[in-house]
Amino acid sequence: MRQYSKLEQRLLNEFQQGMPLSSTPYADIAKQLGVYETTVLETLKRLQTEGVVSRVGAVFRPNRIGASTLAAMAVPATELEDVAAIVNEFDEVNHNYEREHRFNLWFVVVASDEDQLEKVMAEIEERCGYPVLDLPLLNEHFIDLGFDLKWT
Amino acid sequence: MDMRRDSRFENALIEVISQGLPLTSHPYAAIAEQLNCSEAQVIEGINRIMMRGDMKRFGVVVRHRKLGYRANGMVVWDIPDARVTEIGHCIGQYSFVTLCYQRPRRLPEWPYNLFSMIHGQDRDAVIEQVEFIVRQCGLSDINHEILFSNRCFKQRGASYARKQNLTLPGMVRSE
């Protein structure tokens, strides 16, 4: 991991929420940071190219928009990459991780509505050939304020 | 006002802002051009969606792994149903817990009903934080497991649109 400048650290840590709804939000951010708008834009572009920033955008609560679920599969280690690739082919899958457990493939499926979600889950199960654990959200027990990166 | 058209506009707007704003001086104007409406309509639309409380956050979305938070543990707990809200709130209050969700058990193969996500610089840091939670919330009798993540096969913003019929003319889908 490379060293991040003070400006990069502040951009990454202090602007995970509260994107200004003005005509020129990046200029507003620049003003708060005491730099030029072009500096903010160039820095964000660089961080995005490096993969540190996924995007500047909205994160929605599960199931408020569309329907979603967390899914898990127990896949033999030798087949994991192939099965993960099949899962990735689905546009409705946005996160897909290997985890250390008998259930070793974990992914999030988001669809436009419940019917579509059910269809996609069935299709994933059929194409992968392993049963899928369907673990939809029942209750949320925290307030997401972004993640404090605690720069030291 | 035609409500159906209005919700179609909102769906398209939700799709665009969850995939990400353009990194240009006037991002909302750029989105307006894409969706064939005015900049004011885009800003009002986002504001409306925000006011409904559907949005968790709107800003810079970081990838923790790339920032040195290499260890990510999904901690799953088997909590008596009657206590799940109380314990969920206890676990969810700590800043290093980025998600705390109640989900259904799937017996016999899956006994856990509470899921919390913990990011740390390394495994030991995550384990330490789990031990801290166990002590603070009095969970020494509660069965739990830490599922560390290994490979990330995919991570991007959610796509809510059904490909075939929700895409408006001129809307660009980005990965």
Image (cartoon, rainbow, N blue to C red):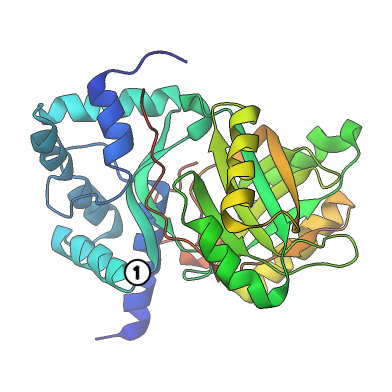
Counting from the top left corner in percent of width and height, residue A144 is at: 42, 55
Q: Is residue A138 visible?
A: no
For residue B152, above or below residue A141: above
Corner quadrant of residue A134: bottom right
Question: At 42% from the left edge and 60% from the top edge, which residue is drawn?
Answer: A143
What residue is drawn where x is 46% and y is 63%? A61
What residue is rendered at 19% in x and 61% in y? B43
Residue under circle 1? B10
Amino acid at dot 1: Glu
Q: Element at badge 1?
A: helix
Between A132 and B12, the one nearer to me in the picture: A132
Picture coordinates of residue B14 (x, y %)? 38, 61
Q: Where's the C terminus of chain A, which quadrant? A: top left
* Residue B107, image x, y percentages: 87, 67
Q: Does residue B71 sit above or below B136 in this rendering?
A: above
Describe residue B23's horizontal placement relative to residue A91 as left or right.
left
Q: How many numbered markers are drawn?
A: 1
Q: Is residue B162 visible?
A: yes
Q: Residue at x 39, y 47 (%)?
A: A146
Viewer-proximal residue, B15 or B92?
A: B92
**Would residue B109 be found to the left or right of residue B7 on screen?**
right
Q: Residues within 10 Å of mark 1 (few under 14, many from 20)?
A: some
Instruction: Please report, as a chain letter, where disc 1 is located.
Output: B
Picture coordinates of residue A72, whole percent (x, y):
76, 53
Above/below status of B108 relative to B66: below
Can you name the residue that lies furthest to the top here? Answer: A2
